[in-house]
């Protein structure tokens, strides 16, 4: 393993003795994280696709939503506990399935999982993690799910699912909104390239499918990169071949959500991939109320993309989310202080959520509803 005071590519990391008191919110961690990773890596972590319209909207939409308080509410018996697919959680903040976390810290996902475990946060392991799904599972004793990208060969997809089940993951989260990698101009301009030693460890040993030569009339994207993209039939096949609950990540349209539920999907993640997939998609918070109204109260809906504070968590819960997933915020903590930084970021978000709940007069997560917020239309 690399020197703990160096990034995976060998650059020197600043040293911290504990967590500075000046780190009071996610924005503080974001500013400091730029000093702990090389500039091209930081731009890769920060960047979105295309013109970054979706990336900007993910943040802007939360500023267009305001909290409304109830007076004289007794919150003395309140708490942030919630239940998700029969799992009782200490709070509704999960770590999203972020790929290649060794870009941020030499121990990558192992260190992040330790931080999540310390704050009793649900964890979702990425197919493209830079540590094995089995090793990650050994570091997190709480609720853990496995995020799945369909592989070109069904045998490899099924092997990933079976490995996850054997390692104790209790659900599969299938990502369907990023079937082709959208480029990040910010990362390109910074000269980002994956450092030696950072790879998709879970896919090692799976032979790549043979390359099909394209004719001059064919598209590198449409007939090339998208040739192995999953279809509805592939999702049906997956549902027939696992007993684990399956959730789908990347849902924005009500019609898609309704079809997914008819097939047997047990939960949804409203997401635009953190602004890293199809640029120009609306922020998930904008479509969340439509999804909730159409699907009813019983369907688990999570939200990612744009969460930067406990107040954002509150707003997402008010507009219909059962829980949220955070990505970049915990990467900032991971880059700055490893597991301690991840745990501290989670603690900051949970404390902010509790403060917001207390002042809004909503003692429990179940008390947070549409009348808890005011939106600019």
Image (cartoon, rainbow, N blue to C red):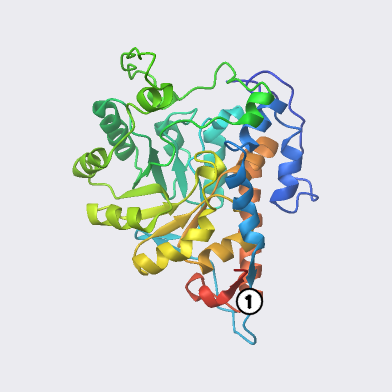
Mark 1 residue element: loop
Q: Is residue 299 left or right of residue 36?
A: left
Residue bearing the label numbered 1: 68
Outermost residue, right side:
22
The quadrant in which residue 348 appears is: bottom right
Give the answer, above or below, for where 24 lies relative to 182.
below
Q: Residue at x 40, y 54 (%)?
A: 253
The quadrant in which residue 203 appears is: top left
Q: Is residue 72 left or right of residue 92?
A: right
Give the answer, above or below, for where 190 lies relative to 291.
above
* Quadrant where the N terminus is found in the figure: top right
- Labels in figure, total: 1
| Residue nearer the viewer, 370 or 60 | 60
Q: Residue at x 50, y 43 (%)?
A: 273
Q: Is residue 283 left or right of residue 204?
A: right
Sort mark 1 into few (<14), some (14-19) or many (20+) by Cα contacts within 10 Å: some
The quadrant in which residue 371 appears is: bottom right
Q: Position of residue 31 (x, y in %)?
A: 76, 42
- Camera sees residue 310: no
Q: Position of residue 218 (x, y in %)?
A: 37, 20
Q: Position of residue 318 (x, y in %)?
A: 53, 69
- Camera sees residue 50: yes
* Quadrant where the C terminus is found in the figure: bottom right
Outermost residue, bottom side:
72
Outermost residue, left side:
240
Q: Residue at x 42, y 42 (%)?
A: 177
Q: Position of residue 242 (x, y in %)?
A: 23, 42
Q: Residue at x 47, y 46 (%)?
A: 123
């Amino acid at each position: 393993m690399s020197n703990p005071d160096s990034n995976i590519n060998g650059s020197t990391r600043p040293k911290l003795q504990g967590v500075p008191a000046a780190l009071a919110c996610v924005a503080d961690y974001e500013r400091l994280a730029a000093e702990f990773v090389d500039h091209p890596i930081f731009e890769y972590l920060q960047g979105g696709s295309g013109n970054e319209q979706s990336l900007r909207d993910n943040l802007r939409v939360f500023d267009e939503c305001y909290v409304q308080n109830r007076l004289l509410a007794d919150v003395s018996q309140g708490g942030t506990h919630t239940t998700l697919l029969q799992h009782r959680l200490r709070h509704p903040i999960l770590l999203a399935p972020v790929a290649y976390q060794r870009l941020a810290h030499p121990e990558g996902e192992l260190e992040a999982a330790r931080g999540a475990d310390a704050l009793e946060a649900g964890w979702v392991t990425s197919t493209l993690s830079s540590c094995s799904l089995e090793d990650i599972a050994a570091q997190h004793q709480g609720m853990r799910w496995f995020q799945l990208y369909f592989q070109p060969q069904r045998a490899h997809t099924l092997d990933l699912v079976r490995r996850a089940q054997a390692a104790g993951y209790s659900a599969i989260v299938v990502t369907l909104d990023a079937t082709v990698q959208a480029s990040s101009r910010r990362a390109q301009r910074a000269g980002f390239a994956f450092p030696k030693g950072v790879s998709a460890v879970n896919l090692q040993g799976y032979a790549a499918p043979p390359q099909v030569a394209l004719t001059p009339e064919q598209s590198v994207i449409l007939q090339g990169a998208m040739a192995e993209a999953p279809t509805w039939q592939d999702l049906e096949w997956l549902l027939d071949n696992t007993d684990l609950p399956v959730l789908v990540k990347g849902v924005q349209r009500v019609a898609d959500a309704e079809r997914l539920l008819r097939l047997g999907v047990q939960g949804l993640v409203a997401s635009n991939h953190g602004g890293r997939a199809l640029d120009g998609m609306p922020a998930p918070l904008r479509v969340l109320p439509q999804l909730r109204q159409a699907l009813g109260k019983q369907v688990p809906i999570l939200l990612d993309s744009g969460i930067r504070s406990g107040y954002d968590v509150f707003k997402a819960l008010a507009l219909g989310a059962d829980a949220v997933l955070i990505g970049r915020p915990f990467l900032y903590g991971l880059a700055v202080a490893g597991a301690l930084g991840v745990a501290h970021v989670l603690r900051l978000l949970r404390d902010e959520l509790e403060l917001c709940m207390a002042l809004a007069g909503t003692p429990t997560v179940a008390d947070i509803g549409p009348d808890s917020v005011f939106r600019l239309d």
